[in-house]
Amino acid sequence: MQLLPILEPLPAAAPAAASPDTTGSAKGTYAFVSLGCPKNLVDSERMLGLLQIDGYQLVPEADGADFVVVNTCGFIDRARAESFGAIDEALELKRKGRTKGVIVSGCLAERQQELLLQERPEIDFLVGVFGREEITRVADRLVGNLREQRALFRPAPIRALDDTNRLRITPRHFAYLKISEGCDRLCTFCAIPRMRGKHASKPIEAIVQEAKQLSEDGVRELIIVAQDTTYYGIDLYGQPRLAELLRQLDQLPGIDWIRLMYFYPMYVNDELIQTLASARHIIPYLDMPLQHINDTMLKRMARRVNRHDTETLLAKLRQTIPALSLRTTFITGFPGETDAHFEELLEFVADQKFERMGVFTYSLEPDTPAAQLPDHVAPSMMESRRDRLMAVQRKISRQRNKRLIGQRRDVILDQAVPNEQNVWIGRTIGDAPDVDGVVFVTGDQWSLSTGRIVPCEIVANQEYDLVAVALSNGR
């Protein structure tokens, strides 16, 4: 079982201020698998950095490693199934004597706690979300055969944890910057507050310092993440301070693109919009999960927004920020969703023509308020509605991509296409890693490389992806 490269077969970045063991006297070897969202990825990188600083050696294969760390996601059914699958693969290696132990960390461990040990007693140690800072102590206990305390959980901190000294596993030219932890929203479908605690911001100066460290490590694209980005700072400063934070990040040398993810529709005020519109390096891309548009559904979800205010906000964003790419996500089959509610959502998506969109079927989470709501929708109906919604989006995407043929766009190159001569996979400013489309770039007459931002001409389109020709070496 090959657990690294993690997430995707991209070239891994160099350690960000984590010093590798060069003495040949590593305390032990380990393999690592990271699952889930970019916030969880930052936690993985922090644990990797701590293990490396402490003298443990990361290896690409679990087979033969002293131990395996599985940093899990516990958000919805599909994510939990993937996490259980990774855990079971590691445990199978342990049964065969090909690794000594398995440490399970992250959201699934936090959510299930001791129940996970009861279901899979061969797990050696559980580490909760906020126990990540003690991962080296847990590793020491495993390597030293000290097993009497097998679970380590810590309460959610009142301030977000430090994420410096990470061993990054994204390509060197982009990185995720987590500005806060936890969430004060009580959306009825969501278990994140139970796993990640209440909203806790990092101080502005700490975030800027971390961004500087990432820039010095070669990062050109900084991707801002949190559970609720627009709520940033309210716990520290008494009011949201995202606009001020972004103005400071926009001044940092070396950062070419700043991308914003996980915008909640509340707290997007005129100051913030003007900051986005006037910034030098904040690209015109916003990820704003809306979940639904029907007012009855939004109320049942406890989203604290309505259709009118949402449409007003979307119109203001598009009017103020030139060439804005809006990404959103929706849930189909939430309890009580009728045909009329869904048709309203379908019409809204057709009218808005979002540049990027994802759709999830409702996942029943037993420990959330939505589980107790009446009128649950049949799984087949959830899936049918998801497919219909995505069919509308595919048509929108095809039409938009077709109009791009002949136009010029800057593309950041993520990786070379294996076994191809000077063919690359990249992204425009309208594409976030992993969740959006890609651009296939050819550049026979140019010397291209990973991390370069290259001017390209779009020459062909696919359903979600583009094909382009490089016009120069870029920068």
Image: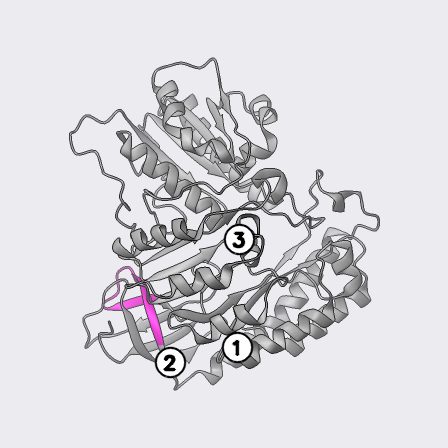
Q: Residue sitting at 51 percent across and 74 percent down?
A: 274
The secondary element bearing badge 2 is classed as strand
Residue 238 percent across, percent down from the top left: 58, 52
Quadrant where the N terminus is found in the figure: top left
- The residue type indicated by label 1 comes to Arg
> The magenta stretch spans which residues?
410-425
Closer to the chain start, of discs 3 and 1, is 3
Residue 412 is covered by the magenta coloring: yes
Instruction: Identify whether 105 is placed above or below 229.
Output: above
| Drawn side of residue 163 relative to residue 219, left or right | right
Residue denoted by label 3: 233
Question: Alpha-carbon neighbours of circle 1 within 10 Å: few (<14), some, or many (≥20)?
Answer: some
The residue carrying pointer 3 sits among few (fewer than 14), some (14 to 19) or many (20 or more) residues within 10 Å by Cα, namely: many
Q: Which residue position holds label 1?
A: 398
Marks 2 and 1, the one that precedes in the sequence: 1
What whole-number distance in Å separates the C-alpha atoms at marks 2 and 1? 14 Å
The residue that mark 2 highlights is 458
User: Disc 2, disc 1: CB below 8 Å?
Assistant: no
Helix, strand or loop at label 1? It is helix
Residue 125, position as x, y percentages in the image = 47, 24
